[in-house]
Image (spheres, helix red, strand yellow):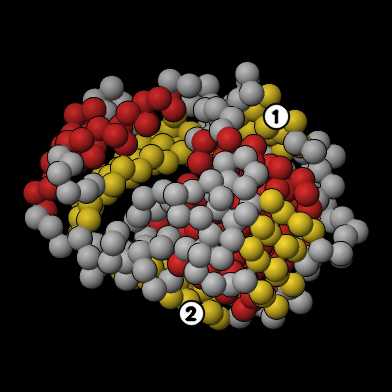
């Protein structure tokens, strides 16, 4: 792991770039790994409701818990935060976001730090598992976790209950094994499409909705008859109601995922169409990873030993902002080629 020689507090501008919660999550993760005090101001300044929302507050509390850290400003709506981590404390943790706030985004904050702890950890977290503006559970399990494993990280995820907006109440278990070192990756070409898996699921709604979603996906994917693998039709146990279509595409050199959530007034066919259209756009591009995975892998690229390169569908403001945060902590400089939609790191 690339490590700087910093201990005086780093100040991070939360209004930088896209000004969202990813700045907070990446800052907390790197502060914990490096045991580096930080001050963040302007938290989520780019959002309609600035400051810490429940899922962000839970991420802050979780990171204080796993580092024995001191925190100031950990309140709903707070736009400023001071975080002083002490040491990584692996173990078993149980967390409850208390709303439909994303369990995936809280885990996204914790996983990098716990990977570098001395022992394994187990995190049980309650909240939203399939909610807007965040990777759903199945994306985290079937896309992110395999790519992390390719870099040398071990993450196992299980879902006990499904949590939809606005009720939440989903329950996810994450088992994180420590690693002494992550290795860089080369994702410049995805190579041949090997397999497509599809999930159509509902909770507390007629199964006919999931069947209509499934039928529309199968209709849209008729051009890939020899690539279609597992097709799942599920009813997820949940205190709430919701529907989802998730498509996972496995390539020779990587994996990508495409999610579409249902909502009141949105036909089942439209839910399926949205996921299929995202899949088609990706397949018709030359990208090796989807833009969401590029966001998530940037931090691990910076923590890994050796060079890394990936091509994505486009260099988003979200990605460049995340890169800016990483570069405030670590002695790295990403090479970003917007025209080629490539990011890379060299030793």
Q: Which of 34 and 9 is in front in this view?
A: 9
* Residue 231 placement, left or right of 47: left
In which quadrant of the rendered image does the C terminus lie?
top right
Quadrant where the image shows the N terminus: bottom right
Q: In this view, does 122 lie above or below 52?
A: below
Please state which of residues 165 and 123 is positioned toward the viewer in this rendering.
Answer: 165
What's the residue at 15%, 62% (across, down)? 204
Report how far apart the C-alphas of labels 1 and 2 lie in the structure. 38 Å
Residue visible at 52% across and 36% down in the picture? 291
Give the side of residue 175 with respect to residue 299, left or right.
left
Picture layout, residue 249 above or below residue 142:
above
| Residues packed near mark 1 inside 10 Å, few (<14), some (14 to 19) or many (20 plus) | some
Disc on the earlier residue, 1 or 2: 2
At 86% from the left edge and 64% from the top edge, which residue is drawn? 8
Whether residue 310 is visible here, answered yes or no, is yes
Image quarter of residue 37: bottom right
Identify the mark at residue 276; answer none if there is no mark.
none
Q: In which quarter of the image is residue 341?
A: top right
Q: Which mark is residue 336?
A: 1
- SS type, badge 2: strand
Q: Mark 2 = which residue? A: 94
* Relative side of 17 to 94, left or right: right
Percent across and percent down for residue 243 are 23, 51
Residue 281 position in % (x across, y down): 40, 25
């Amino acid at each position: 792991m690339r490590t700087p020689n910093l201990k005086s507090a780093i100040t991070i501008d939360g209004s930088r770039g896209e000004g969202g919660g990813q700045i907070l999550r990446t800052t907390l993760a790197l502060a914990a790994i490096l045991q580096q005090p930080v001050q963040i101001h302007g938290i989520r300044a780019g959002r309609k409701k600035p400051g810490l929302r429940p899922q962000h507050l839970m991420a802050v509390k979780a990171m204080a818990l796993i580092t024995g850290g001191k925190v100031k400003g950990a309140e709903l709506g707070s736009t400023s935060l001071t975080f002083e981590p002490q040491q990584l404390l692996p173990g078993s943790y149980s967390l409850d976001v208390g709303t439909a706030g994303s369990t995936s985004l809280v885990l996204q904050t914790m996983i990098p730090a716990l990977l570098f702890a001395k022992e394994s950890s187990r995190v049980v977290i309650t909240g939203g598992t399939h909610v807007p503006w965040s990777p759903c559970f199945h994306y985290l399990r079937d896309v992110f976790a395999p790519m992390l494993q390719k870099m040398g990280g071990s993450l196992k995820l299980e879902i006990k209950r499904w949590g939809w907006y606005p009720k939440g109440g989903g329950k996810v278990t994450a088992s994180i094994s420590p690693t002494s070192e992550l290795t860089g990756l080369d994702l410049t070409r995805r190579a041949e499409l090997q397999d497509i898996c599809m999930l159509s699921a509902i909770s507390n709604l007629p199964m006919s909705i999931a069947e209509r979603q499934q039928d529309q996906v199968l209709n849209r994917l008729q051009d890939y008859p020899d690539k279609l693998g597992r097709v799942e039709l599920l009813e997820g146990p949940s205190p709430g109601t919701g529907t989802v279509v998730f498509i996972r595409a496995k390539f020779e050199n990587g994996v990508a995922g495409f999610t579409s959530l249902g909502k009141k007034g949105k036909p089942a066919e439209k839910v399926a169409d949205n996921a299929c259209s995202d899949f088609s756009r990706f397949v018709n591009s030359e990208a090796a990873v989807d833009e969401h995975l590029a966001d998530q892998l940037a931090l691990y690229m910076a923590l890994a030993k050796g060079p890394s390169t990936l091509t994505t569908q486009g260099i988003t403001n979200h990605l460049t902002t995340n890169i800016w945060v990483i570069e405030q902590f670590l002695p790295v400089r990403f090479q970003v080629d917007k025209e080629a939609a490539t990011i890379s790191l060299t030793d």
